[in-house]
Image: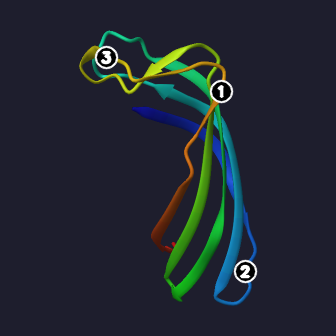
Amino acid sequence: GIDWLQFGGNVETTKGRWAPFLGFSLGASRLSVLSGGVDDSWNFAAVLDGGVKFEVLPFMHLRLIGRIPFTFVADENEVLCPLGGCEATLSGTPLIQPQVLLGLGFNFNL
């Protein structure tokens, strides 16, 4: 599994009902294996993201998000280790996991 601890933010500009945005964050990721006795590994990580927010109603919006998380693997890490037999080893190469997400958001004005 991969767990992320990230700090960053987004910048967006409103153009009518549409709001394009860009984001960036820095932090760490933990590579963990549930079996096989392999130790967890913490590595430097960054995430680039961007997309568009569309206002459906004054209190509700949809977001289409494209994300590219990068984990910079410093040491040799074993991955894909079901039942103790590892299928892959990462060493010194960034682990890149592109994602496309669709979200529903709500605005609360207190």
In terms of image quadrants, where is residue 64?
Answer: bottom right
Mark 2 is surrounded, within 10 Å at the Cα level, by few (under 14), some (14 to 19) or many (20 or more) other residues, namely few
| Amino acid on which disc 1 is placed | Thr
Q: Is mark 1 on a helix, strand or loop?
A: loop
Amino acid type, callout 3: Gly
Circle on res. 85: 3
Residue 28 occupies which quadrant of the picture?
top right
**Residue 3 versus residue 60: which sits nearer the camera?**
3
Looking at marks 3 and 2 on the same chain, the residue that comes earlier in the sequence is marked by 2
Which residue occupies 72% across, 80% down?
14
- Mark 2–mark 1 Cα distance, whole angstroms, equals 38 Å
Residue 109 in view in this figure? no
Q: Where is residue 88 in the image (x, y as percent from the top left)?
A: 45, 23
The answer to whether residue 15 of the structure is visible from this angle is yes
Q: What is the x, y in percent for residue 39?
A: 41, 11
Q: Quadrant of residue 29?
A: top right
- Residue 56 vs residue 36: left or right? right
Its colouring scheme is: rainbow
Amino acid at pointer 2: Thr
Q: Is residue 39 above or below residue 9?
A: above
Q: Name the residue under label 2.
A: 14
- Which residue in the rendered view is the most extreme toward the left? 83
| Pointer 1 residue | 93
Rendered residue at 59%/39% (across/down): 6
Residue at image coords 47%, 25%: 31
* Secondary structure state at the residue bearing disc 3: loop
- Label 1 crowding class (10 Å Cα cut-off): few <14, some 14-19, many 20+? few
Give x and y (percent) for residue 55.
56, 84
- Going from N to C along the chain, the mark reached first, 2 or 1, is 2
Q: Distance between the residues labelled 3 and 2?
A: 51 Å
